[in-house]
Image (tube, helix red, strand yellow):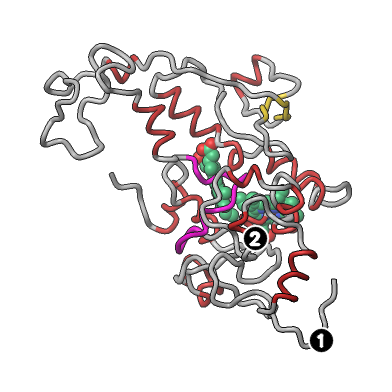
């Protein structure tokens, strides 16, 4: 696609040529800018495959065709697709089993998506032997299409725990309670009664404990949350943190996700662009903290001297 010499970047001719030359997103909000979309969440999975490949060849929906062709990084792509940073099953498994919400010690809940964005199931194939299950962590996960669904059984351990003062009453709040933090979490009549719900299931979903998974880009809306998805989530650096202790030499680029590229077509003062449009092995801790500051994965923030306070 060509435009006449001297055409300015803000002319209609230039805009039209740009639109014709690039795969267009389904979400029209993303069409006006090359920056990462703000708060894409699961809309990202509905995006057109060609667009995802164009804006982020490292996204896990497209990585098999881009990074993972034979002779290149097929092994890395396979591993990252089944990594706990992509499916999140470790936290779900630990929180639900340890709180008595489910009786299975082997993780069953997590997230995984195919190339078209539809949910898929991860299984170990061939299945682990009883000895392997008892002694070893299984690394032979494979992907199957179909979704496992699950309904909450008893939360007896938490429900029967001692403590609590008054019996909860419908629509009658306890005045000295902190808003949103009921002292009595379950109703004394059982699940889903007297306006009480299951705290572990609700907590995991409501606080978006495992929001930061590799299938999605970051929220790209504030310092500390600028990142791409997939391989690029770690290997393409964004300006997120001004501290040289966290970001090393990248600290000089600030924390509002703006670029330092020499490419004249990328706006300088727009957030949501990587510092440079390139992969690196020089990954600063601040790049990991984009995800690892969120509850559920924030154990890595202890390396910064931070801890979970609550
Ligand atoms: C896209 C978000 C994301 C990014 C970026 C990310 N992680 Fe993770 N990471 C996770 C999630 C989510 C988990 C936990 C999965 C679970 O609990 O099931 C995790 C788990 C881990 C674990 C295992 C923790 C354990 O308890 O066994 C380590 C170690 C880790 N990450 C280190 C890193 C490092 C180092 C980087 C940067 C190079 C990084 N992560 C970048 C999301 C991310
Ligand atoms: C959670 C963060 C993270 C993600 C996601 C990630 N990587 Fe990496 N990768 C790293 C780190 C950290 C290194 C080591 C960098 C160093 O110090 O050399 C690395 C190193 C590599 C190397 C170099 C290995 C070597 O022997 O030199 C390759 C190749 C690579 N990654 C490919 C990929 C591909 C392909 C993907 C996506 C499928 C991917 N990575 C996703 C963190 C990540």
**Residue 31: mark:** 2
Residue furthest out toward the right: 71
Task: State the residue at coordinates (82%, 78%).
Answer: 3
Q: In the shown orientation, is residue 208 left or right of residue 62?
A: left
Q: In the shown orientation, is residue 110 left or right of residue 117?
A: left
Task: State the residue at coordinates (68%, 64%).
Answer: 280
Residue furthest out toward the top: 189
Q: Which residue is mark 1?
A: 5
Mark 1 residue crowding within 10 angstroms, few (<14) / some (14–19) / many (20+): few
Is 220 a magenta residue? yes
Q: Main secondary structure of the magenta part?
A: loop
Q: Observer-nearest residue: 72 or 28?
A: 28
Question: Considering the numbered disc 1 on the image, is that residue within a helix, a strand or a loop?
Answer: loop
Taking the image in four quarters, ligand 2 sits in the one at: bottom right
Q: Which residues are magenta?
A: 210-225
User: Image quadrant of residue 207?
Assistant: top left
């Amino acid at each position: 696609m060509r435009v006449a010499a001297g055409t300015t970047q803000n002319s209609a001719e230039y805009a039209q040529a740009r639109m014709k030359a690039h795969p267009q997103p389904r979400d029209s909000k993303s069409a006006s800018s090359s920056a990462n979309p703000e708060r894409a969440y699961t809309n990202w999975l509905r995006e057109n495959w060609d667009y995802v490949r164009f804006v982020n060849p490292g996204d896990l929906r497209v990585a098999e065709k881009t990074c993972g062709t034979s002779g290149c990084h097929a092994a890395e792509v396979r591993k990252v697709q089944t990594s706990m940073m992509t499916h999140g099953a470790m936290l779900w498994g630990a929180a639900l089993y340890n709180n008595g919400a489910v009786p299975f010690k082997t993780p069953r809940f997590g997230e995984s998506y195919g190339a078209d964005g539809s949910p898929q199931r991860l299984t170990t194939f061939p299945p682990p032997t009883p000895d392997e299950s008892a002694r070893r962590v299984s690394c032979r996960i494979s992907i199957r299409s179909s979704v496992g669904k699950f309904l909450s059984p008893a939360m007896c351990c938490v429900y029967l725990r001692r403590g609590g003062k008054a019996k909860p009453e419908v629509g009658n709040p306890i005045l000295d309670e902190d808003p949103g933090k009921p002292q009595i979490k379950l109703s004394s009549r059982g699940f889903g009664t007297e306006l009480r719900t299951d705290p572990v299931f609700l907590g995991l979903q409501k606080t978006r404990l495992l929001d930061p998974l590799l299938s999605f880009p970051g929220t790209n809306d504030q310092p500390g949350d600028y990142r791409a998805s997939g391989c690029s989530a770690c290997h393409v650096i964004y300006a997120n943190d001004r501290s040289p202790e966290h970001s090393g030499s990248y600290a000089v680029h600030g924390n509002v996700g703006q670029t330092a590229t020499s490419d004249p077509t990328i706006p300088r003062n727009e957030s949501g662009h990587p510092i440079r449009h390139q992969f690196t092995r020089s990954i600063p801790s601040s790049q990991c903290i984009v995800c690892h500051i969120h509850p559920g994965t924030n154990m890595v923030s202890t390396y910064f001297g931070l801890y979970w306070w609550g």
